[in-house]
Amino acid sequence: MEKDTMHVTNEKQELYNRKVLGNTMIDINVMDSRVGDFHLQEHAEVVNRAIGFKLCFESIIKQRLIDLCRDVPFDSIRSCASHYNNDIQKIQPDAFEDTPSVQIINLDGNYLSEIPRLGKLKSLKSLYIQANQISNPTFPNEFKDLKKINDIGLSNNAIRKLDDLTFKNLQNSDVRKLEVTRSKIDEISTGAFKWLKNITSLKLGYNPLTSSDLEMAFHGLVGSSLVSLNIDNITLGGVLPSSTFQLLQNTSITTLSMKNNKMSSIPQKGFANLKKLISLDLSAANIFKIDDSAFEGLDALTRLFLNDNQLSQVPNNLPPSLQKLYLNGNQISALKDNTFKKLSNLQLLYLGGNKIHQLEQNAFYGLTSLKKIHLVDNKIHTLPGRLFESFVVLDSLELNKNNINQIPNSGSLFASMASLQYLNMADNAFSSCSMGLFKVLTSLRYLHLENNQLGNLIARDVNGQLFAGMDKLDLLNLTNNQLTQLPDPLFKDLINLKNLTMRSNKISTWGDNLFKRTYKLEILDLSQNMIALVNSSSVRDFKKMKTLDLRQNPFACTCDLRWFRDWTNTTEIMILHSETYLCNSPPEWHGKKFLSFDRHKINCVWFTTAEIIGAAAGGFLLFVIVIALVYKRRWYIKLRWYRIRRSLKRSSGTGRGGYQKINGDVNQYDAYISSASDNYQWVLKNIFPGIDSGDLDTEKFGGEFKLYFEDRDAVPGKAEVYNIIENMEASRTVLIILTKEYMAKERYKFEIITAIDLLEKGKISDILIVNVDGLTARHVPRLLLRKMERHDFLVGRFRGG
């Protein structure tokens, strides 16, 4: 696309800024005419997502107190017009006269009291007027000519009533998605939705609607194209009448969400008229009782969410078509024989967070297609010998946080689960089982046994039987298991093990051959143990090791530790947090930093003063020179080394470190956030809300884009350059947060150069820049400055506190 379609000219910006009412500026970033030039349906998905993120980024600029600058040079950034803190109360009919190609309008968070007259926007497809003060939602006559509009958001207003005229002027439009949640609606007329014949998705949740109100609303949906209906958290008066959905029997509705309603019970044939229903969400609805025929007629249902209710038992007569069943967070105490007998198609079963203490022998009989079962956080103490007999294709079993302290006569417990890849038995006080318990799990890749009491059992395993035959195991976690002795044959069959954690035990030493056959071990955590000395034979077999963690061990800083101390200076293995290591003995070294200990500070061999001084001075000078050179070019050295290793791995057929690329979208993230660690809180406050689709420290950000953020998404144990290159290549866009802290570190200059390189190679779609500290040209790398002066990037400037 030509540059003049990507930037607003000064004249057009001036005209745009004159679109005001009184002293109130109408600021809609997507008024930029370039939006109309993007024919989204003609672009690949990766391009659409990249454009979508850019538009979303622009639309929140005003809410984050950032200036949108379309006419840089960089030095003139202060001349850019401010577009934040909009208090729009009304929009004049000719406000959009010069922007006929606009397809998306976002007016969220203003003070509009009515639907604006947007008749000039013939190409409009999406309209968002959420979080305003609209009380009259009737669409003006001008909307009769807007035939392309298909997505409308009206949530968080003060609407209260939808009548027969509300959507009448949309009858010529192609409205497929309508959201009117959290708007205090308590009345809907029978003809309110009759004009929207093509509607496929309707959200009415979080309004004070009763069952009778729903029936009135459904009258207008008879014969519609409705596929998805969301009525979360409405007022049902504690009961769902059987006739509620009778009017929707001729629709194609496949998804119904009713979570957070207070229904207490589901009546007989409650959903019988919804023959095509595939997904039904009844989570957190305070349900105590479900009639035996409640789900009768739901022959197509594959997903049923009943989690976080008050059920004391698994409902009877569940649809045999179910593939995913969520019953976690209820009050279920026992699973009787044949509870799931008819659910032969079920693939995922969530039963965590209940009070299950009794499992009968055939409780899971019939679940021959089950791939994942979640039994976390119950009170299970016994596993009957034939309990898992039906799990012939199971690949994930979670039993952590129960009371399984022993498994007697356990030789055949897992006999049918040759396909199992993930097993979690952590937090069980587990201490006793037969040595061959895991032997049949020949496909197992991840085994979690942390926070148990396996110390004595492992000490007795002198022949290496406990983990025998597990040659596909990738991860083993034995944290906090009272381990003291590790017999040499313990890991003899773990030839593919990459990650081993034995943190918080009482290990003081290990044999020379313990790691002899763990050829691929990359990550070893032995922190918080009783290790005082490490010699050369202890690490002899660390051929592929990348990270080693020995924090909080009582090192004896004596002559015997000299080799290990020297080794930490020369090894390519990353010694995690070595700056925190402390000497525990001898007394004169107690409490001192491990890194301050070296052979020159302890009298183990006699040398002349001249020899000592000469060697020390020469070594120090050479060390300083080498370190200075390496430090200056460290990021490029790391990059070169990383590319060589990746090239070797790919040429040997192991791909990216042995992992296979996931099918589907080549870009895992919509944007890579490049920011200094000092700006962590700023990013969370000003960038994530409303954009990021994930969460951090239990905070959900409520967006729809997947952002890569190093503090949350970096692959644990991987080198920094790995996380930079791999995740930047896996992103569609790079968002650079320019600050003084950012430009002060070589690492972030390296990220800038890498992003520009990837953009020029076509591996990412765009680079967006936010200037937080008002940095001038002399603070910015020359390569980045030239491109900013040519308007290659969208640049924003932060003006808030």
Image: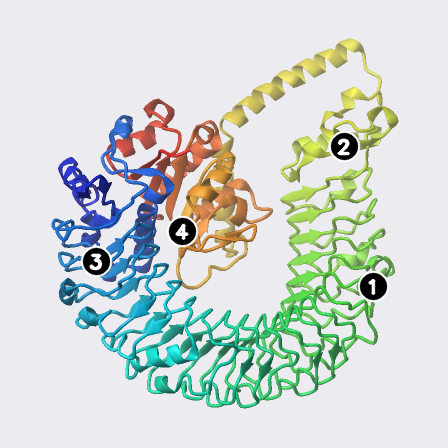
| Residue bearing the label numbered 4 | 691
Q: Which mark is residue 431?
A: 1
- Work out whether 95 lies above or below 666: above
Q: Earlier in the sequence, mark 4 or mark 2?
A: 2
Residue 532 position, x and y percent, is: 82, 38
Identify the element where label 4 is drawn: loop
> Residue 374, percent across and down?
63, 70
Q: Which residue is mark 3?
A: 39
Residue under label 2, please give it.
582
Mark pair 3, 4: CA separation: 23 Å
Q: Work out whether residue 153 can be spotted.
A: yes
Q: Are marks 1 and 3 in contact (CB under 8 Å)?
A: no
Indicate whether 624 appears above or below 303. Answer: above
Quote the CA–CA distance across marks 2 and 3: 62 Å
- Disc 4 versus disc 1: nearer the observer: 4
Secondary structure beneath dot 2 equals: loop
Q: Could you tell me which quadrant the C terminus lies in?
A: top left
Residue 269 is left or right of residue 396, and the answer is left
